[in-house]
Image: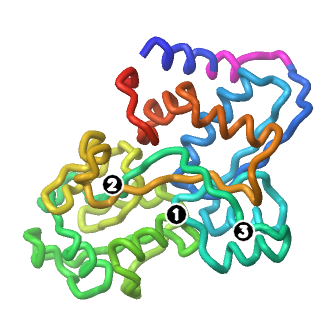
């Protein structure tokens, strides 16, 4: 815990400092909105420890990041899913490589509902039926007699693709859903609407309720022991084996220091360390 407090103080001091540091190396990172809070925190701390490096981090979704990586616009794509064949082909066409993935953290997908909604547990099958359009009323899953208002992420989101693959089993989303650009926007909408449902990273601890799935609570313990059914790895992608400052940054992310930050921000380290708070 002391290490994490020191990290936070360092970031605060960095933000308040009036000293202008000369940057000699620039890293550009773009992609998953799910990973955005984590990668921004990594970048801030890394720049404090490495003042000759400037890191620019931008969201927009995993697909957007993959496109930027294939164009050579960025150094690293942050992704909440694995690369698609068509994305790998784009990288091959430009660079002659298929891209290199590095697992950097673990996340879990939560099903969000309004805290006032009496439904606190759903099965995977019920979630699938809700998002395919087979179930349209909360009464069908033990709730009030009210229409379910579906909220989705945009198709460019890795979370959208993960949900479609692992929950819908490759099937189509209901056409009645409303797509929102970020997890934050989705959560804010559910907080105002008792009949809404959505999905996103478990690390977003907000005023919405995170449903149990198949009777299993979306908790750190259940993600680490693999009993919670909607867990996934998060990745940093490069066009080839990372070199230079890109390699140094990724190695730092995988270090104990970088993985401490994973835990602090609310995600899960890729390896278990009893010293993590």
The answer to which of 113 and 225 lies nearer the viewer is: 225
Q: Give the mark, 2 or 1, whose residue is nearer the N terminus.
A: 1
Task: Name the residue carrying label 3.
Answer: 98
Q: Give the mark, 2 or 3, whose residue is nearer the N terminus.
A: 3
Q: Which residues are magenta?
A: 11-19
Query: The residue tagged with tag 3: helix, strand or loop?
Result: loop
- Tell me where residue 174 sits by quadrant: bottom left
Q: Position of residue 181 (x, y in %)?
A: 55, 65
Residue 55 drawn above or below residue 23:
below
Circle number at residue 81: 1
Q: CA distance from mark 1 to mark 3?
A: 15 Å
Q: CA distance from mark 2 to mark 1?
A: 27 Å
Q: Position of residue 226 (x, y in %)?
A: 28, 51
Q: Mark 2, mark 3: which one is toward the viewer?
A: 3
Q: Label 2: how many residues lie within 10 Å, few (<14), some (14-19) or many (20+)?
A: many
Residue beneath the point at 89% across and 30% down: 23
Position of the C terminus, as image quadrant, is top left
Tell me which secondary structure the magenta stretch mostly adopts: helix
- Tell me where residue 151 sits by quadrant: bottom left
The answer to which of 140 and 169 lies nearer the viewer is: 169
Q: Mark 1, mark 3: which one is toward the viewer?
A: 3
Left or right: 40, with 223 as reference point = right
Query: The residue tagged with tag 2: helix, strand or loop?
Result: helix
Residue beneath the point at 54% across and 50% down: 103
Circle number at residue 191: 2
Residue beneath the point at 81% across and 35% down: 54
Is residue 14 highlighted in magenta?
A: yes
Query: The residue tagged with tag 1: helix, strand or loop?
Result: loop
């Amino acid at each position: 815990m002391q290490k994490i407090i020191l990290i936070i103080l360092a970031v605060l001091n960095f933000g308040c400092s009036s000293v202008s540091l000369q940057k000699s190396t620039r890293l550009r990172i773009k992609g998953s909105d799910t990973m955005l809070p984590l990668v921004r925190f990594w970048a801030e701390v890394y720049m404090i420890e490495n003042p000759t490096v400037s890191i620019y981090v931008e969201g927009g979704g995993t697909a957007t990041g993959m496109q930027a990586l294939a164009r050579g616009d960025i150094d690293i794509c942050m992704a909440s899913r694995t690369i698609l064949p068509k994305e790998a082909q784009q990288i091959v066409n430009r660079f002659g490589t298929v891209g290199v993935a590095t697992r950097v953290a673990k996340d879990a997908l939560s099903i969000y509902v309004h805290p006032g909604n009496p439904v606190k547990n759903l099965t995977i099958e019920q979630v699938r039926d809700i998002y395919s359009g087979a179930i349209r009323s909360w009464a069908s899953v033990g709730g009030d007699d009210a229409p379910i208002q579906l909220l989705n992420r945009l198709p460019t989101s890795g979370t959208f693709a993960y949900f479609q693959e692992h929950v819908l089993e490759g099937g189509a989303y209901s056409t009645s859903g409303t797509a929102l650009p970020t997890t934050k926007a989705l959560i804010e909408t559910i907080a105002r609407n008792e009949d809404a449902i959505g999905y996103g990273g478990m690390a977003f601890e907000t005023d919405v309720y995170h449903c149990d799935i198949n009777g299993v609570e979306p908790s750190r313990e259940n993600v680490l022991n693999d009993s919670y059914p909607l867990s996934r790895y998060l990745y940093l992608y490069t066009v080839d084996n990372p070199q230079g400052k890109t390699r140094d940054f990724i190695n730092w992310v995988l270090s104990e220091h970088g993985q401490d930050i994973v835990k602090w921000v609310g995600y899960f380290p890729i390896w278990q360390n009893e010293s993590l708070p």
